[in-house]
Amino acid sequence: MCDKKNYVLFTNTECLVLSPNFKLPDENQILLKIPKKDNMYSFDIKNIAPKESMTCLVANATLDESMLWHKRLGHINFKNINKLVKDNLVRVLPTKHFENDQTCVACLKGKQHRASCKSKVLNPITKPLFMLHIDLFGPTIVSSLMHKKYCLVVTDDYNRFTWVFLTTKDETSEIENLMDKKVKIIKSDNGTEFKNKVMDDFCREKSIKREYSVVKTPQQNGVAERRNKTLIEATRTMLADSKLPTTFWAEAVSTACYVQNRVLVVKPYNKTPYELFRGFKPSLSFMRLFGCHVTIVNTLDSLGKFDGKSDEGFFVGYSLSSKAFRVYNTRTKRVEENLHIGFLENKPMIEGTGPKWLFDIDSLTQSMNYVPVTAGTVSNISAGTSEENSQDCIVMLIWKDTSYFDSPTENVDNGKPKTADDAQRQVEDGLNNENAEQERFADDSSSKDVNAVRQQVNTASPDVNTGSLELNVVGPSVSIASSNEEDSTEEEP
């Protein structure tokens, strides 16, 4: 056939004899050309540099030979070895096809990975509340205003509608009542907060099937895990933008969940979770900036004719049980629900303009009338000389008589003792007590002398007289003078 200038084409099923006028449509399809010599078509495969795949000319290597080269080359993938042969990228490597029989135990020990959990292309669930995904995140470092450190997130598999802080059986029943449908399946991880007798009895009573993800495999509970991540990131962003302290994290999580139910888009249906769950499109006309300044109309207290009618506060969320806003009142330091709110969204939010006791420790100590311990320097002037020595000392305020707290009206009169005799008696009692303490201290230490003197201190409070405060000045050989507002006396050590 070939001597008559015909073309012969062999396939895996037949042999085709083509006419002499046949032409290949594309010369690039030719992988190998072998000239005819002595009525034979012979070639040396080692001297051929093939353009592309030449697996039809490559013999299969034995299993032992394949495993040997696999180990020699550092347990690389067999696909990589065959690519080296196919593209002629190295020398000396046998031109054979290496097969993997999955018998390399070392590769299984060193290279095995977790199985991938691919997302579903089409969700088979077509009814709300058929399956609920639940997960718990926490504990948080900072507790919320209601002293909570955990957050329970419940997500509907069909429409991705989400609830937070649903921690009791009554709240779970409330979800069912919203749609007049029954929950069929609850999917969660293997945490003890879900796998316990109380939860099992509740699901058995409600005829709810339980499904769990594999241990140490949160990917199987991906719906709840992704929702947790979305809520936490939104909460972190809202707190940073509003400059509110981390104590408001629970309010921020609730607000983020409320907003995302109305603005996120579920891909298969191209609708919001709220529309899929309730059946109509949500309205965004009442949405406000989280953490913005607000004025709250005081509807709880009985106000006078000329008293202020509103308090200042911050917007922290939306009410789930009524058409109202949740605001933090800086006067009462409580979160309350109120409809009569004035929003100041254009007012800049500056850190520290909120409740001072949440930002500044000095404001907290001032509200407690706390007097800190102070350190200073006391000058000692020796008698008969002009030499002045500076000694470091610590001044501590000590309540000597607690009766001032019990009956302040008997000992206080405009911040001063009632009579001069009472004042003199107090000075004498204080000196006697100080002399007794000085003698006891002198027995223990002969190298240092301690002189203590008391000084009357009056505060601005009309009810508490701190005249009984005793100032103990501790230092090596220190002598100071005691003075009152009316006269001054000097004591010798």
Image (cartoon, rainbow, N blue to C red):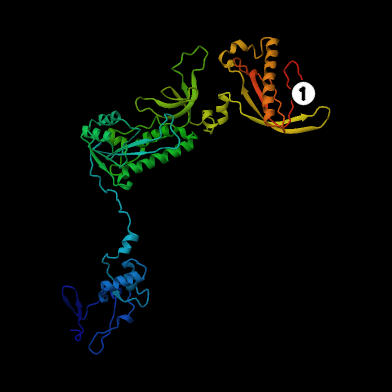
> In the image, what residue occupies the spot 36% across and 78% down?
92
Q: Looking at the image, which is closer to me, 256 or 166?
A: 166
How far across and down, in percent of the image, does residue 370 sit? Answer: 58, 25
From the viewer's perspective, is 172 left or right of 465? left
> Which corner quadrant of the image does residue 390 belong to?
top right
The relative height of residue 50 versus residue 321 in the rendered view (above or below) is below
From the viewer's perspective, is 184 left or right of 137? left
Q: Most extreme residue toward the bottom, as rendered?
A: 38
How far across and down, in percent of the image, does residue 43 sit? Answer: 28, 83
Q: Amino acid at mark 1?
A: Glu
Q: Looking at the image, which is closer to me, 135 or 392?
A: 392
Residue 36 showing in the rendered view:
yes
From the viewer's perspective, is 257 left or right of 311? left
> In the image, what residue occupies the spot 50% across and 35% down?
243
Looking at the rendered structure, the number of numbered marks drawn on it comes to 1
Q: Most extreme residue toward the front, as rendered?
A: 443
The relative height of residue 69 versus residue 165 in the rendered view (above or below) is below
> Which corner quadrant of the image does residue 53 belong to?
bottom left
> In the image, what residue occupies the spot 35% across and 39% down?
264
How far across and down, in percent of the image, does residue 238 sit? Answer: 45, 37
> In the image, what residue occupies the spot 60% across and 10% down?
410
Quarter of the rendering occupied by the N terminus: bottom left
How far across and down, in percent of the image, does residue 117 sit? Answer: 30, 50
* Residue that mark 1 sits on: 492
Residue 279 showing in the rendered view:
no
